[in-house]
Amino acid sequence: MRLLLSRCLALLAGAVLSFSPLAGELPAARIDAYMDAQLQQRRIPGAALAVIAHGRPMLVKGYGLANVEHRVPVGVDTVFQSGSVGKQFTAAAVMLLVQDGKLGLDDPVRRFFPAAPPAWRRVTVRHLLSHTAGLPDDWPAGFDLRRDYADAELTRRILAMPLDAAPGARYRYSNPGYVLLGMLVGKASGRFYGDLLQERLFGPLGMATARVIDEADIVPGRAAGYRLDGGRLKNQEWVSPSLNRTADGSLYLGLADWIAWDAALGKGWPLRPDSLAQLWQPMRLADGRLSEYGLGWELDSRGGHPRVWHDGAWQGFESYLSRRRDGSLSVVLLVNLAEAGVADIAEGLLDLLAAEGVGGAAQPGAGG
């Protein structure tokens, strides 16, 4: 699997590759013009983009600056924070433990946290993964992002949050629910969730720069995160170390990592095809309606192609991943500015690619 990373890096010189007619002609000049315009209009310091068709990287490129103060350009090996796009890795960690027989999606959360209050008796692992547990997204009053919390205290605070809906009744996005899932993975595996990801996903797949955020570490190629304050560019706001290692999306990843992950989604390993199918299955709510969220993934169709996707934002970064289920087209976009509107930028890019027929029809055997 290390060979996979080497191949990815060999392609990451940003060149447009040659493709079969099914892939469509890549409008490289139009993509560059579009990205340059978006960075200028939105005052985004830098961005990294990967376009993958039928498992082959078509365009892998950096734009703008990874670090404004030192004038360091974004390269193909620049590392960005994931934001909530990282939730799919938490879901993958849970599914690996399901494959191991260490937990079940319909296990009650109280199996792992016996101290959970009676209101939690019907909350399952599946509910947390699908944002249907009834947990709100907002942390309770007095929660301080600059305070270091021990895992036990974070767990206690989440379990003390009142549920605002019956489990399974409705979809409501909840970051605390995914923080709790990271603790649950630790309970079921005996390992910190980030170590489990490293051992079972990142290492075997050759995702060499993927890791849990640690701002004290030396991380080659790490981009700086930014925000706009009164129209002026400022550095990202500081968050305590304990809240930068939680399972709601606190990861570093570069484009080579995302390319390796996209390839793994199409190969049925280390997640089995049946496991991936469960992650990409919409949650059926109590009233019979289907949610547009699976387990760690947003679900919809675009241009007649069923796809899975997610966006994320954290600490001066935004990220976006869209993947057609058949593997015919994937787009990864990473930027280092808070509230940059990365989803709007990426959706505009997808429109551009669709107009050129990039991705074309599904090839036999492509995708997951």
Image: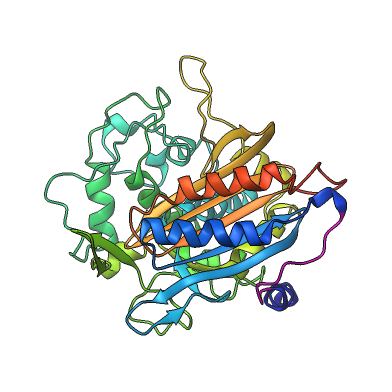
How many marks can you see?
0
Q: At 13% across and 45% down in the image, what residue appears?
A: 141
Could you say which quadrant of the image residue 117 lies in?
Answer: top left
Residue 366 drawn at (x, y percent): 81, 49
Work out which residue is located at the far top of the displayed protein and give it: 287
**Does residue 269 appear to the left or right of 255 in the view shown?**
right
Identify the magenta region.
12-20
**Does residue 66 appear to the left or right of 134 in the view shown?**
right
161 up-or-down from 51: above or below: above
Residue 206 drawn at (x, y percent): 65, 72
Q: At 52% across and 30% down in the image, what residue appears?
A: 292
**Does residue 259 appear to the left or right of 173 in the view shown?**
right
Q: Nearer the viewer, residue 119 or 175?
A: 175
Visible residue check, residue 248: no
What kind of secondary structure does the magenta stretch mostly adopt? loop
Q: Nearer the viewer, residue 44 or 189?
A: 44
